[in-house]
Amino acid sequence: MKIETSNVENIFTSIAGKYDTLNTVLTLNIDSLWRKKAINISNMKKDNKVLDLCCGTGKMIYYECKKVGKGTEVIGLDFNKAMLDVGYKRLDKSINDYKYKLIKGDVQALPFGNCSFDCVTIAFGLRNIPNKTKALSEIYRVLKPGGKAICLELSTPQIPIFKQIYRLYFNYMLPIIGYIGTGSKNAYSYLRDSVNNFMTKTELKYAFKSIGFHDTSYKSLSGGIASIHYGTKPIVVK
């Protein structure tokens, strides 16, 4: 199912206020553990300049601010204003003594100069971007040489039996629970379809490599229902 960008934006606008609560319920709060693991794999350090794309309500930014410290601003970018508004309220309550900025923008045309960031993260957002190759190219462009890109995404389990059980839950139960929780018929049906139509873990690994990233790989999480993809921009760019 192909949905226009404007319709995707409308979907996220309709569930912005309930997005965090429902995702915590649907994943049994495991998504917080996935985010922490992604931050650890990034090797993010104090005072690093960090950009979080498709930042939504700022869950990754919370952990990133804690990692880089109070003296360094973390920047988040998302295409949906309603999600950003919720993000500001959430972050202002939890880490208002840290520095962060949330910007409305397009991942396919980032408003930053070349080699601006030590680390760029994107969690559960790449599959929502129409031109994924362009998005990865933009991530590569704004990274400093030696900088790391981290992509946390939902994926499809490959373990027999568990794969079948999860498929039943994800394809049939999740859209129903999502509808009950948000009142939106489209939101979690879209989530299901966007994951089912997304690249495999191996395909995404080679998409990173084709852009120019080195040391590309991925780590499967929770039996393969999510994965952390990563790559490093080479210090000597040919």
Image: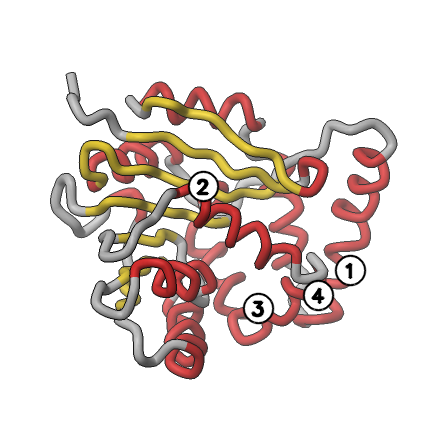
**Earlier-in-chain disc, 3 versus 2:** 3
Please say if the residues under marks 4 and 2 sit with CB atoms less than 8 Å apart.
Answer: no
At x 51% / y 63%, what residue is drawn?
12
C-alpha distance separating marks 3 and 4: 9 Å
Q: Residues within 10 Å of mark 3 (few under 14, many from 20)?
A: some
C-alpha distance separating marks 1 and 4: 13 Å
Quarter of the rendering containing residue 213:
top left
At x 60% / y 55%, what residue is drawn?
31
* Residue 104 visible to an observer of this rendering: no
Quarter of the rendering containing residue 76:
bottom left
At x 51% / y 38%, what residue is drawn?
228
SS class of the residue under badge 2? helix
Residue that badge 1 annotates: 176
The spot of residue 118 in percent (x, y) is 24, 45
Residue that badge 3 annotates: 20
Instruction: Mark 4 vs mark 2: give the one in front.
Output: 2
